[in-house]
Amino acid sequence: MAWNWEQENWPNFDYDKEALADFENRFLSESGTLLGAFKHLSGDERQTITVSLLSDEALKTSEIEGEYLDRESLQSSIRKQFGLQTETRNIPPSEQGVAEMMVDLYEHFDSPLEHRTLFRWHAMLLGGQRGIKEIGRYRTDDGAMQIVSGAIHKPKVHFEAPPSKSLPFEMERFIKWFQRTKKSLPALTRTGIAHAYFVSIHPFEDGNGRIGRAISEKALAEKLGRPTLIALAQTIEKSKKAYYTALQSINESNEITSWLSYFAETVLEAQRTTLVRVEFVIAKAKFFDQLGEHLNDRQTKAIRRLFEAGPNGFIGGLSAENYIVITKTSRATATRDLSDLLRKNALTKTGELKHTRYYLNYSLES
């Protein structure tokens, strides 16, 4: 068995350009739509959604690797990185590190990718982990770097990365390829190859997946000339099995059309997810512009909680009991408030009696 990096054509990846053409066109078109939506946000709204999207990406890129972080700590750390006011709290090294990497990627998206960039990201990500021997440098251990599963006495080897002695050459070649293709390759093709290429080299002891996804987002941002803020890790995390299956398909082959098609579809879905988030923020502003003066304090508090839940709202919808807990009011008052919100088209409802559930009508359609 020969791994992809052991084959004669490595790292000259083969793929069907025609199969990717429609993805590339849709990406550019939808990027314009997303940029137009961002322009409708106020400065404070842009700030808020930027912190929210970056913290979600930090959270989800870690969850893909089985590391579960605290969202509030991530947001607090990201706000601090941007110099914004935030509550004082002790932020664990894991949250602090990935937050630093996400902000560094956002602020320096157009700086050349260099070895020191990757070393800096690696040190940010893993600086607080005692079990990692080599932090902020490529691995030097002579042992095989393998991705395995199964029992210890009978492991299944899914992939073996290039030996450490070849990493200086492999990573220098990767860096030069990344710089050289900034203008010559279409956006989705380049970002897909960059991710596959980097994780195939697997240059670090740990953190390769998270850094590989950061490189992908950098590739997209460079092509667009601005930070993308797309929900890439969030989209991948929803279907981790599909992600790892797609990656596994290139372990023994440098024909990567199927991988690039998968990754292109993922990027497009991530782009749509971000657009929904931005449109939701715009809808929130319009909602309060139209109805804000006509809501009492209890209604305003409940509506804000619904908006905080995001475009998908409360799981299962808002019940009268939820409203009572949120507003700390009586059942009779809750019933009057909810009926009034329905009359004002602020909410819609489904079900009857104890099964009644309420949902934001943030488009204010009757």
Image: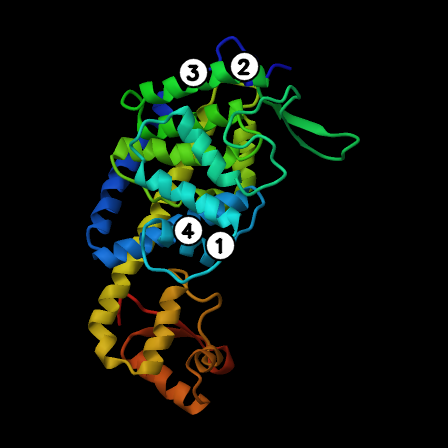
For the residues labelled 1 and 4, the Cα–Cα distance comes to 13 Å
Is label 4 in a helix, a strand or a loop? helix
Q: Residue furthest top?
A: 8
Q: Which quadrant holds residue 298?
A: bottom left
* Mark 3 or mark 1, whichever is nearer to me: 1
Residue located 53% across and 39% down the image: 126
Q: CA distance from mark 4 to mark 2?
A: 35 Å
Marks 3 and 1, Cα distance to the nearest angstrom? 37 Å
Can residue 8 be seen?
yes
Kind of residue sitting beneath label 2:
Ser
Identified by mark 1, the residue type is Ile
Q: Nearer the viewer, residue 94 or 179?
A: 94
Of residues 62 and 149, the one nearer the viewer is 62
Residue hosting label 2: 166
Q: 96 and 273: which one is in front?
A: 96
* Residue 134 on image: x %, y %: 57, 30
Residue plotted at (49% across, 49% down): 95
Q: What residue did someone put label 4 on? A: 55
Mark 4 vs 2: CB contact within 8 A: no
Whole-Å distance between the Cαs marked 2 and 3? 11 Å
User: Given this view, does label 1 or label 4 mark the residue nearer the observer?
Assistant: 1
Q: Any mark on residue 91, and which?
A: 1
**Identity of the amino acid at label 3?**
Arg
> Does 236 sit above or below residue 192?
below
Q: Earlier in the sequence, mark 2 or mark 3?
A: 2
Q: Which residue is mark 3?
A: 173
Disc 3, SS = helix
Give percent across and percent down for residue 137.
51, 27
